[in-house]
Amino acid sequence: MSKGIVLNGPSSAGKSSVAGAMKEMLGEKLCVVAPDDFLQVEPMQSIYEDDVFDAQSGMNRAIMEALNQGKNVVFDHVMTGARILDSLKCAVGSHALTLVHIFCLIGVLRQRELARGDRVIGNAEITAKYLYPKENYDAEFDSSKLSPREIAKKLVDFL
């Protein structure tokens, strides 16, 4: 049975890079879903939890469609509240869902955020502070110690 992996962590922690590396390794066997694909957001525009929650039903449909086609799914997200995780858990039903925390030191987040040039400065630190959940992840990876490819390999091996 196909599985879902939630990559949760602050902005600029490396979630999208990990998801991209997983996609390179697995190709068509993997579907990557991210709020950025469902929201109309301009660079440097803040994204709020209510905006993401409004788009959640579309994301849930895309996730379930992929799971029902036998694909594994990576959900690349910055969750700041229980309602998004609860909605996702409800949507995937009997499919396995693994919650993975991608994090790094605050100084590294700041450097990455500045280097990106497409995020509101300070957003990475704020999302780190308000990330939900704070604990009880199935796996945790420090992206300041492991490359996106190294983390992806561990997750692909898990699948």
Image (spheres, rainbow, N blue to C red):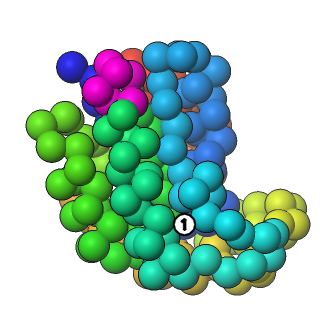
| Left or right of residue 10: residue 7 | left
Quarter of the image for the C terminus: give it. Answer: top left
Which residue sits at x=54%, y=66%? 10
Q: How many numbered discs?
A: 1
Mark 1 nearby-residue class (10 Å; few <14, some 14–19, many ≥20) = many
Residue for badge 1:
10
Q: Is residue 92 magenta?
A: no
In percent of width and height, residue 81 lies at 34, 76
Indicate the quadrant where residue 84 lies: bottom left
Which of 112 and 40 lies nearest the eye of the viewer? Answer: 40
Which of 114 and 74 lies nearest the eye of the viewer? Answer: 74
Q: Is residue 151 at all visible to an observer of this figure?
A: no
Which residue sits at x=42%, y=42%? 62
Which of 68 and 21 lies nearest the eye of the viewer? Answer: 68
* Looking at the image, residue 157 lies above or below residue 75: above
Which residue sits at x=18%, y=54%? 90
Residue flagged by tag 1: what amino acid is it?
Pro
In percent of width and height, residue 99 lies at 31, 49
At numbered mark 1, what does the secondary structure look like: helix, strand or loop?
A: loop
In percent of width and height, residue 34 lies at 54, 51
* Looking at the image, residue 150 lies above or below residue 115: above
Quarter of the image for the N terminus: give it. Answer: top left
Indicate the quadrant where residue 92 lies: top left
Which region shows up in magenta? 66-71
In percent of width and height, residue 32 lies at 52, 37
| Left or right of residue 42: residue 88 | left
Q: Is residue 90 at all visible to an observer of this figure?
A: yes
| Left or right of residue 50: residue 17 | right
Which residue sits at x=43%, y=52%? 59
